[in-house]
Amino acid sequence: MRIMGRPRALVAVVAGALLLTGCGSGPSQVGAAAVIGDRTVSIDQVQELINKAVREQPIAQKLAGEHKLDVVGRAVVSRLVLHELLVKAAEKQGIRPNYAQIDAQLAKDPLNGPVPADASNEAQAMTQVVARVRDHREELTDTYLAQALADKVVPNASVTFDYTSVGLVPDPTTGAQVEGADAKKAAFDLARQFAADPAASAKRLQADGQYLTSLRQRAAQMGQSPESVPAFAGVGEVLPAAQVGSLAAGPLFGSPVGSAVVFPFPNTPRAWFVGMIRQRSDQPVATEQAPELDAATKTAIGMRQTQPLFDELGVRVNKRYGVWDVVTMNLAPDEDATQGLVLSPGGSGRTQQ
């Protein structure tokens, strides 16, 4: 039985993999999984890494058995797109790899070993799988470049923005608490309205800020702490990257001035942040002692620096692999699965692809 079972399993794997290379709309270049400026990620490259993952990684084998190789495919394409963007971002900043340091890491090879099939966080597990099936020196070089970008950008970067939220407190006009899919739709619609009419957005954001002030005053009059009312809106907020840790890895620090942004409200998954980017600065900011960033956070902050290049280089991703999610900086299965939007003034944007 075991001899017969193995061919069936392999057929299932190959059949699942072939679904990822079938016909479909996408970049004009034949055989392209993604096009990044003058660089192309081929479907063959992607398929080779998918096959390697299935051969070597238990969690990929599990996904193959569940006919979910599309998850692996999205992770592979996402990582290869980010690689190309990262190389360009480092070049623009004049950052070169320190190969002596990279080769010292490679001698210990932290990317050896399988990712467990029972990993609790599938997205993180897929990132680890792709890191292991790629060329390890190239993967470690990407990590070096991302962290070097963070080291260069974080000390001086700051962003000024106005914001409101959906789902954090009851709607001021109806008193209703919007939740779940309705909250997401309302937040996305509001971001589109902000992008289409920046003047109207300023009025709405000002009004929501005043509403927050009135609620906090009411709380104080009732003997409660004003901070018992969550900060669901604000105008003229300034965030120095050096003081906000992982928030510096988010779309606030990658989006252009004048754009509308929406993403899950920090530390509150049921609510949505909707804001307008008012100003960006790379001048030194007087702040308190900056907290030490761990390696993963530094890498994520560095990766965020590639966000503007997605539009600048006109990145196109073959739709069979999904759509680009600017918040997670990865591919999502479809637009409904994305975690946010970044829209330029007038309502246009290439947040999804």
Image (tube, rainbow, N blue to C red):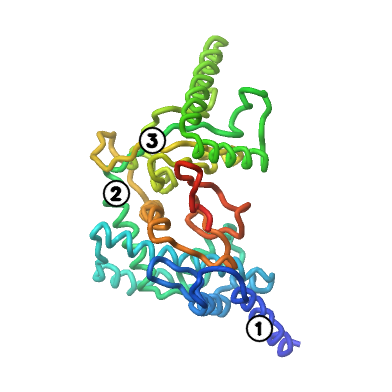
Which mark is on residue 237?
none
Q: Earlier in the sequence, mark 3 or mark 1?
A: 1
Q: Judging from the image, what secondary structure is the residue with disc 2 in?
A: helix
What residue is drawn where x is 46% and y is 34%?
A: 198
Q: Which residue is mark 3?
A: 278
Quadrant, the N terminus: bottom right
Which mark is on residue 10?
1
Q: Nearer the viewer, residue 352 or 54?
A: 352
**In the image, residue 59 above or below residue 243:** below
**In the image, residue 3 above or below residue 116:** below
Q: Nearer the viewer, mark 3 or mark 2?
A: 3
* Distance between mark 3 and mark 2 Cα atoms: 19 Å
When asked about the image quadrant of residue 264, the answer is top right
Q: Residue furthest top?
A: 221
Decide if residue 323 is in sight here. Answer: yes
Instruction: Determine whether, in the image, residue 185 is placed left or right of residue 112.
Output: right
- The amino acid pointed to by label 1 is Leu
Q: Nearer the viewer, mark 3 or mark 1?
A: 3
Q: Earlier in the sequence, mark 3 or mark 2?
A: 2
* Distance between mark 3 and mark 1 Cα atoms: 54 Å
Instruction: Determine whether, in the image, residue 102 is placed left or right of residue 135.
Output: left
Q: Residue furthest bottom?
A: 3
Q: Which residue is mark 2?
A: 153
* Distance between mark 1 and mark 2 Cα atoms: 47 Å
Instruction: Determine whether, in the image, residue 192 is placed left or right of residue 101.
Output: right
- The amino acid pointed to by label 3 is Arg
Q: Earlier in the sequence, mark 1 or mark 2?
A: 1
